[in-house]
Amino acid sequence: MVTDYDSPRKIDDAGQEGYADTLTRRPDLASAAIDVDETELAESLELPGADLSGEELAVRVIPPQPDEFTCSHCFLVRHRSQRVSELSGQQICLECAA
């Protein structure tokens, strides 16, 4: 079946609703209540500078291995193959040297 999209559309009044009818049937979005537990929200929020002295570290810290170094610019522990050079006693990785 060929459809001419440039021709005016035929509207069946029995099955179609107008824009005004849709707005009257639609619930008001501004009056929709959102169920938010404020205490749960406040407990999950961590403020900068908060006292975390009672918290325990949940990550196992491994010291640098003999074939690793700490970059003096980004302070990341890298493998020795990523070391560019030692300039004035500072070890620099490939990413920081670029």
Image (spheres, rainbow, N blue to C red):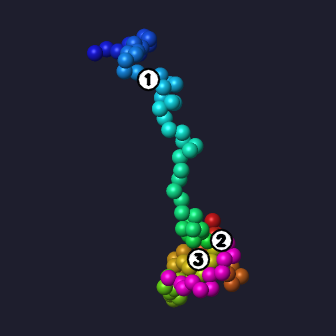
Between label 3 and label 2, give the one nearer the viewer. Answer: 2
The disc, 3 or 2, on the residue closer to the chain's N-terminal end is 2
- Residue corresponding to mark 1: 17
Mark 3 near mark 1, Cβ–Cβ under 8 Å?
Answer: no
The disc, 2 or 1, on the residue closer to the chain's N-terminal end is 1
Q: Position of residue 28 (x, y in %)?
A: 54, 39
Q: Amino acid at mark 1?
A: Glu
Mark 2 near mark 1, Cβ–Cβ under 8 Å?
Answer: no
Q: Position of residue 62 (x, y in %)?
A: 50, 86
- Residue corresponding to mark 3: 76
Residue at image x 49%, y 85%?
60
Q: Amino acid at mark 3?
A: Leu
Q: Position of residue 9 (x, y in %)?
A: 42, 14
Taking depth in this image into account, of 41 and 7 the one nearest to the observer is 41
Crowding at mark 2 (Cα within 10 Å: few <14, some 14-19, many 20+): few
Q: Element at badge 2?
A: loop
Q: Which image quarter: residue 2?
A: top left
Q: Is residue 23 magenta?
A: no
Q: Element at badge 3?
A: loop
Residue 85 in view in this figure: no
The disc, 3 or 1, on the residue closer to the chain's N-terminal end is 1
- Residue corresponding to mark 2: 47
The answer to whether 47 is drawn above or below residue 9 in the figure is below
Q: Quick one: quadrant of the C terminus?
A: bottom right
